[in-house]
């Protein structure tokens, strides 16, 4: 990281996507929206970590267990000028 704002930019390398949503999206003939707009998720802290939940299918996509640790998190954001 070159500066401490680097991590506030878009750093996603591998999107976490609901497999069912992804299959449905691939089967659309002419999707008029991007996959990122098709997928609807809740993301939030749980008792053990962070969960990504599919709103469309009401199922778990990913539940990250912090294993009792409290990893550093940055909730600041950069505003576009
Ligand atoms: Zn889904």
Image (spheres, rainbow, N blue to C red):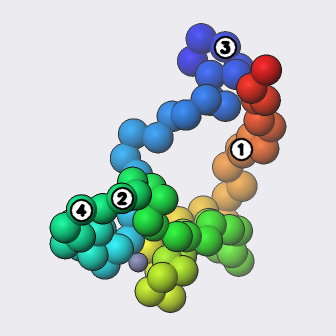
Of badges 1 and 3, the one in the foreground is 3
> Could you classify mark 3 by the number of other residues whose Cα lies within 10 Å: few (under 14), some (14-19), or many (20 or more)?
few
Look at mark 2 in the image and give the residue it sits on: 32
- Marks 3 and 4, how far apart at CA: 41 Å
CB under 8 Å between callouts 2 and 3? no
Question: Relative to residue 68, is residue 2 depicted above or below?
Answer: above
Residue name at image x 77 percent, y 35 percent: 77
Which element type, helix, strand or loop, lies under badge 2? loop
- Marks 2 and 4, how far apart at CA: 6 Å
Q: Quadrant of ligand 1?
A: bottom left
Question: Relative to residue 2, is residue 66 depicted above or below?
Answer: below
Question: Relative to residue 9, is residue 52 depicted above or below?
Answer: below
Look at mark 4 in the image and give the residue it sits on: 30
CB under 8 Å between callouts 2 and 4? yes
Look at mark 3 in the image and give the residue it sits on: 3
Q: Does residue 26 appear left or right of residue 36 in this picture?
A: left
Decide if residue 41 is in sight here. yes
CB under 8 Å between callouts 1 and 3? no
Residue 70 versus residue 63: which sits nearer the camera?
63
Which element type, helix, strand or loop, lies under badge 4? loop
Q: Does residue 3 appear left or right of residue 22 in this picture?
A: right
CB under 8 Å between callouts 2 and 1? no
> Could you classify mark 2 by the number of other residues whose Cα lies within 10 Å: few (under 14), some (14-19), or many (20 or more)?
few
Look at mark 1 in the image and give the residue it sits on: 72
- Marks 2 and 3, how far apart at CA: 38 Å
Among the 4 quarters of the image, the one containing residue 27? bottom left
Which element type, helix, strand or loop, lies under badge 1? loop
> Could you classify mark 4 by the number of other residues whose Cα lies within 10 Å: few (under 14), some (14-19), or many (20 or more)?
few
CB under 8 Å between callouts 1 and 4? no
Of badges 2 and 3, the one in the foreground is 2
Question: Relative to residue 5, is residue 24 depicted above or below?
Answer: below
């Amino acid at each position: 990281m070159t500066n401490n704002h680097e991590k506030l930019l878009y750093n996603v390398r591998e999107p976490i996507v609901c497999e069912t949503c992804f299959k449905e999206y691939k089967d659309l003939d002419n999707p008029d929206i991007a996959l990122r707009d098709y997928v609807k998720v809740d993301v939030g802290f749980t008792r053990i970590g962070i969960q990504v939940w599919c709103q469309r299918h009401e199922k778990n996509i990913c539940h990250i267990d912090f294993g009792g640790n409290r990893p550093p998190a940055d909730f600041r954001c950069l505003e576009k000028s």
